[in-house]
Structures are given as C-alpha cells and as structure tokens.
Amino acid sequence: MPSTNRLTEEPLQKKVERFRAEIKSFPVCLVTGGAGYIGSHTVLELLNAGVAVVVIDNLCNSHMESLCRVHYIARTESQRLQQNGNVPPIFFHQVDIRSTKSMNLVFEFWQSDKIHAERAIIPVSVGEVSANKAYLMLDYTLNPAKRAQPSPQTKDPSTWGRITAVIHFAALKAVGESITKPLEYYENNVAALVVLLKTMKAHAVNVLIFSSSAVVYGVGHEAGISEETVQVAGKGSGGGLLTNPYGRSKWMSEEIINDYCVADPNFHAISLRYFNPTGSHPSGLIGEDPKGTPNNIVPVILQAYQRRRSRVHVFGSNYDTSDGTGVRDYIHVSDLAMGHLAALRKATKQPGPVPEDEELDGQDPVSNYNVYNLGTGRGYSVLEIIKAFSNAAGTAIPFTVGEARAGDLGTVTASPDKAASDLDWRAEFDLQDMCRDVFNWAAANPTGYETLRRLSTMSGMNSQEMRRQSVATGLFDREEDFDSFISTSLSSIDNNNASKDSSGRRMSQHGANFSNMLKKMRSASHSSAVSDNDNPFGGNYALSSSPGHGASGAPRFAMTWGEANKTGTIAEGEEEEDLDLGPTLSPSTSRTLPMRSK
Ligand code: NAD
Ligand code: WQD
C-alpha cells in the first residue's frame, strides 16, 4: 500500500512529484535560517525576483508563520503590480543543519529525480499552507523600479528546478550567550558550516552567500571600517582581537570559506558583514521576534516603550563621540535583504573556475571569494536612536545612563564603498523608516509571531475558552487584554474602509471572510452566551493589523498600546530594577502611527 500524507490523504510519491513539477519553472535558491529575522526578509526579495526558495530551518529561534506571511506579501505585491500572480513557491524543511544525514536528504530531494518518497524528507509547501490564511497588511507604496533585479540564474532554464545557490543565515547569534555556551556556538556556527559545504560539494552546488558580521573586526577598529581591515583572532581584548566565541565563530567561518575557495576554484562565495540590522518590512507582517531577554538596543527600546521593562539602560557616556554614547551603523533589514540579491548576482556571474592567472597561492584572497560590508556608512549615537524612536512614538522613551558594557566600542561604522562599486548596492532607507517600521511591526504583533501562533493552537475551543486559555497560558495578563487585542485589531476594519485591501481594490474572498470572522469573534468575546463553534481561528485564519485610510485620506494604522507612556524620561542616577511586565494590551490608549511614504 502506498504511504500517504495523513492530513490530505495524498500519496506521498504523488506529492513529491507535484512539488518537483511546481519548482521546475523557477530558478532555485536554498536558504538556511530562512524563517529567521533577516532570512525571512531575504526570502521575500528572492520571490520578488522570481526565484523559488527551499528553506531549511530548525525553528530554534523562529516560527514557520514568518514564511507564510512572506508568501502572502509576495502574492499581494504581485497582484498589486498586476504581474501574472505566479509567485514562486517556498518549500520548507524543518531540519537541523548540524545533521549531515538530513542535509544530504534535503539536497537529494531537489537535485535527484530518482529519490523515492519513502527515503525523502518531504517539505511543507508554504504557499499551500498560507493560502488558507488571510492577513490584512499595512499600506505602502511599491516601486517596481526598486525591486531586485533577477540574478543571471533566472535566464538559464536548464538550471531551473535545481538548487544552484545557497544563502546561509542559520546560526546562533547572541554575543553574551556565546560566552557561556561556546561549544553550542562552534557547533551551530562552525561545524554546521562544514556540514553545509560538504553537502554542497556532494551535490555540485557552487555558490554560497554567507551571513557574517561587523563583529569580525574585533576591537581596535572603529569608524568607516573597510573590508581590508585586518582581523586577528585570539583571546583577550587587545587591539584587533575578537572578544567572544560568537565573533570568533564568524571569523573562523570566513576563514573556512576562504580556504575552500582556494581549494576549489569552481566554488564562488561571498561573505556579507552586516553592521547593526533593524527595521522590518513595511507591511507590518514580518519583523524581528527575539526570544528571551533582548540585548540589542532597538528591541530594548521597544520593550521600554511597551513597559515590558522600566527603561533603557544606556551603556556608557564617556566615549569619544558627539554625546559620549556609543555610535553604530544601523541598517534597515529590507536594505540588507537587497544586499543579498546583489551578492547573488555577483557570485553567479562567473560560474565555472576562476581563470588561472587570477588564482593566488596560500592564504591570499582569491577572486572566487569576496567580502563586503553591508552598512550605511552613517553612525547614530544611542541617545540619537532613543530620540528618533521617541519622535516616531510621539512620546519620551525612558532611559538612564550608566556604566559602559564590557567589550563595547565607542564607534562602529562601515565603509559601504566596496559594496557600492562591486555589487551596485547602497542602503536606501533612513533612520526614520527604521523607527516607523519597527513600531508598525510591534504594534500589529505585540508578542511577535507567538500571539497568533498560540491563538491558532487553541483552534478546538470556543471563544470563551480561548479567552480563558490565553490568560492561563500566559499569552495575555488579563482576559480584558485578549478582548482588547481582538477588538483593536478589528477597529480599523470598522472605522476604515473594511472592504478594500491595501491597494484600494476590493478585498479577496479570503479577506472578506476574515473580516466577518473577526467581527464574530469580537461579539463573542464580549458576550457571555457563546456557542461552541464560534472560534474564528478554527479555519486556520490568522489575525493581523488592518490597513485603512483616515479622514484626511492619509493611510493610517491604529493599535492599542496599553499604558506604555505614562512615564517620561527618568532622571539620571535614579535606580529601578528592570521588570518584565509582559505584554500590556489594555484598551486605554490608542495610537495612530504614520505610514511610510517611500
Ligand atoms: P535569527 O535567529 O532570526 O535567524 C537565524 C535562523 O537560523 C533562525 O530561524 C533559527 O531558527 C535558525 N537556526 C539556528 N540554528 C540552526 C540550526 N542548527 N539548524 C537549522 N536552523 C538553525 O537571526 P538573524 O538576526 O536573522 O541572523 C541571521 C544571520 O545573520 C546569523 O548568521 C547571524 O549571526 C547573522 N548576523 C545577524 C546580525 C543581527 O544583528 N541580527 C548581525 C550580524 C550578523
Ligand atoms: C548598540 C549600541 C551599546 C543595549 C551586536 C553584536 C554584533 C551584531 C549586532 C550579530 C551600543 C548600546 C545596547 C542596551 C545600550 N550582531 N546599548 N543599552 O553591540 O553594536 O552589536 O549586535 O552579529 O555582532 O555585537 O549592538 O544593539 O547591542 O548595541 O546602551 O541595553 O547600543 O552599548 O553602543 P552591538 P547593540
């Protein structure tokens, strides 16, 4: 008897064939860590450029929900641009990149026609899953001229349906944690890279784009850092040294890739050294969703705004900078994503071996391996960042200035010139865009992807049970907060033009169903007499923010922000413990955030 997929009863072999047939019309890129923050934004730009994506992620720091939203955004954008709507697929494998066996199975699945379903790791078709979901997203202007240009791969149909390149995001990334768990960092970031390279070699995939970091410059290098800046790994905190295992894992990874490029001139690789990524896609549907207690400044600012911590602790005020606080090069994640597309174009330009006279001996750089900074070249101090976010929020973000953080530098900014000249890439978004997009994402997703994921796991319950469970499981503090979340997510459906989508056209049937279900949910959540089958999430629908147009005609977005802003700036030196107050979603304060105009 043929094995079947339990959910659809579709024979597995048939499903495998269907997936293979579907991907054959597209160039294919494999993305590790594609469900994560930077990965999800990059997967979106790959789809926009006509590239199908195979994602490998073990979801240790992400949700598959991000990919569902990515596919939804790509479909919506395609409709808005009146393209044919034939958005490339995303196939998702929940796999750990440390496992040689699993990695080989994934590559075999896509690179070989012979593999039988019994032996394969069957992926999830993200487009199929997200087709049953409806999202209402923020309005934003699409500029087709600014879309990523297709990579050369797209022009050669003989390569379609096969993985021809890998973008490798999957890694652990918390600097502090790496000091207490160095082996986990070396295993996930370094050993797994070797597994990936060996698997790529075994399946003749010869293009790699690698997520590196400005952390590899170590201490002793500050403003306008260029790619040639020498890194010297080692212990301690002297000039040029790397001070933590995370930094060393990225430096070692770069060295491994360089060595492999020396050994195999057919292999083309690019390492991209990101400076300080922030922001989120202007739709408000995808963004950064850090687990645990965040350390990076922007998530910390957001938590202070949400009153999930009392204030921002500014680390140090005696640096040699304009106001004494640390200066960093913040870059919008959508700009970063476009940087990956630019790198892919460059790395796939010259398939085949590098000409012999370009090869260099030993450890010298080789022309089939390149390194680029992805930064803006412009730095902002911690106080400037807090001010920019305060302006975007319309309220003061509380902060205190304290001791410097061990290992921190005064200024870290990029020279973006090499990426500009070689990759024809420059950052386009400014600090205001980053602030606005961070707030929009957070407003629509107050507890990140978790809100909707956990609500949707309650799909067997009626609304009253969901209301109780949402508190019992710690998703909301009070049942009223659950009501508030539902009703504020609905408010713009009522107040604004409910039956239009973000492009101003009639909503799809999904959108209309969605709006009706939310209305039902709202009345149910305010009523004690609730029937047993009124759960709007039962149909696999997901909730998001809604677009709309205010009285002035300007697009707007409304969301409740609890009592976030009753405190102003806390005086320097005043002591208060950081509190994790959890999400605050009381119905008391409603905030309208501006929309992007780019
Ligand atoms: P992220 O945690 O959101 O994404 C990483 C993804 O990799 C997650 O989805 C996680 O589940 C997955 N992953 C981790 N280990 C895995 C494993 N063993 N097998 C399979 N999947 C695994 O982080 P991000 O901010 O999107 O970062 C992406 C990459 O960029 C990382 O390599 C990171 O080191 C690098 N980077 C990030 C920053 C930053 O500030 N965000 C800065 C410089 C470099
Ligand atoms: C930015 C500025 C802090 C938190 C790290 C990694 C780097 C890369 C990006 C992965 C600094 C100050 C921060 C706070 C503060 N990640 N700050 N109070 O340290 O530049 O870089 O993230 O590759 O590798 O090292 O970023 O956001 O932590 O700090 O005053 O609560 O904000 O001192 O000046 P950093 P960050």
Image (cartoon, rainbow, N blue to C red):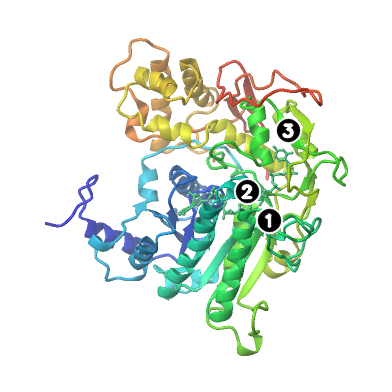
Identify whether 515 is placed above or below 481.
below
Q: CA distance from mark 2 to mark 3?
A: 18 Å
Disc on res. 354: none
Q: Residues within 10 Å of mark 2 (few under 14, many from 20)?
A: some
Quarter location, residue 345: bottom right
Q: Is mark 3 within 8 Å of ligand 2?
A: yes
Q: Residue at x 53, y 80 (%)?
A: 264
Element type at mark 2: helix
Ligand 2's image quarter is: top right
Q: Amino acid at mark 1?
A: Val
Image quarter hosting the C terminus = top right
Q: Are marks 2 and 1 in contact (CB under 8 Å)?
A: yes
* Label ID, residue 175: 2
- Extreme left residue here? 1
In this orientation, which residue lies closer to the viewer: 344 or 261? 261
Question: In the image, is residue 174 above or below residue 104?
Answer: above
Is label 1 within 8 A of ligand 2 (CB to nearest ligand atom)? yes
Total marks in image: 3
Locate the N terminus by quadrant. Answer: bottom left
Left/right placement of residue 26 relative to residue 353 reads: left
Amino acid type, mark 3: His
Q: Is residue 144 above or below residue 513?
A: below
Nearest to the observer: residue 76 or residue 13:
13
Toward the top, the furthest residue is 528
Query: Which of the numbered marks, if any, corresponds to residue 313?
Result: 3
